[in-house]
Amino acid sequence: MRVAIKAAALLSLLLVAACDGREESAIDNLANGANATQVENNVRAEAMALMEPLTPPRPGTPGGLPADPAPVAEGSIDPDSAQGAAQVVQGYYGLLEEKRFEDAQDLWDQQGAIGAQDDAHFEARFRGFSEIHANVGAPSESEGAAGSTYVTVPVQVYGRIAATGKPFYTLRQMVLRRVNDVPGSTQEQRRWHIASIGAYVPPEVPPGDNGMEAGKAISMTDGMAHKP
């Protein structure tokens, strides 16, 4: 059965390569006793090289994150700060990039619908993507409500559609929540957790500020996790 699966995978790659004759050299290599796995890897590498490159829009351009002179901090920072929340966002998309879906789900509020979802259904959210990457923008100021603190972080998500290999780009924003340091709260509750992911809403521009009007919300669906 494993041999049949391997052959089917190689056949699909040969079909991708068929448009320019590369399948002929691959078949010749197989006929001459080349290792099937190596041939598959070679064909895969050639097919990937022909894919449209991933070029997410730059900050300050349409489809890009807001231009901000203060990037997300690297290294040692206060984990309870807004920058600490942004680092959780970086970690989340890093886990998705590595296809560590169970670990990524652990960063959600476990009391919410997505955090409490079973592993298989959470992983299925990303089945349509062969690659997932993200650029993380500057977090908002922390806001308090009902014994908790909230931070909003803009994210530029990009990658490839699994079925076609085509790039996708979208802007999202993540709301993170942590319980304040109050008596009875646990260490886990006082960490940042993802509360929701939704469409990116540009910050409002005050009237008369260089004659610019407030931006309109961008509504996109990219198969990412939606608000619980």
Image (cartoon, rainbow, N blue to C red):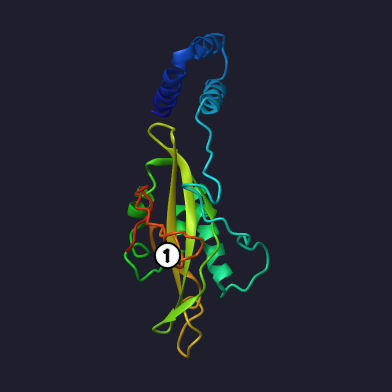
Q: Position of residue 131 (x, y in %)?
A: 48, 41
Q: Position of residue 59 (x, y in %)?
A: 55, 51
Q: Residue at x 46, y 47 (%)?
A: 63
- The image quadrant where one finds the N terminus is top left
Residue on which disc 1 sits: 108
Decide: is 171 above or below 147: above
Q: Residue furthest bottom?
A: 183
Crowdedness of circle 1 by 10 Å Cα count: few (<14), some, many (20+)? many
Which is nearer the eye, 91 or 58?
Answer: 58
Which is nearer the eye, 72 or 99?
Answer: 72
Any part of residue 193 in sight: yes
Q: Residue at x 62, y 74 (%)?
A: 78
- Which secondary structure lies at badge 1? loop
Residue kind at label 1, given as amino acid type: Trp
Q: Residue at x 49, y 11 (%)?
A: 21
Q: Residue at x 45, y 80 (%)?
A: 144
- The image quadrant where one finds the C terminus is bottom left
In this picture, residue 75 sits left or right of residue 207: right
Any part of residue 131 in sight: no
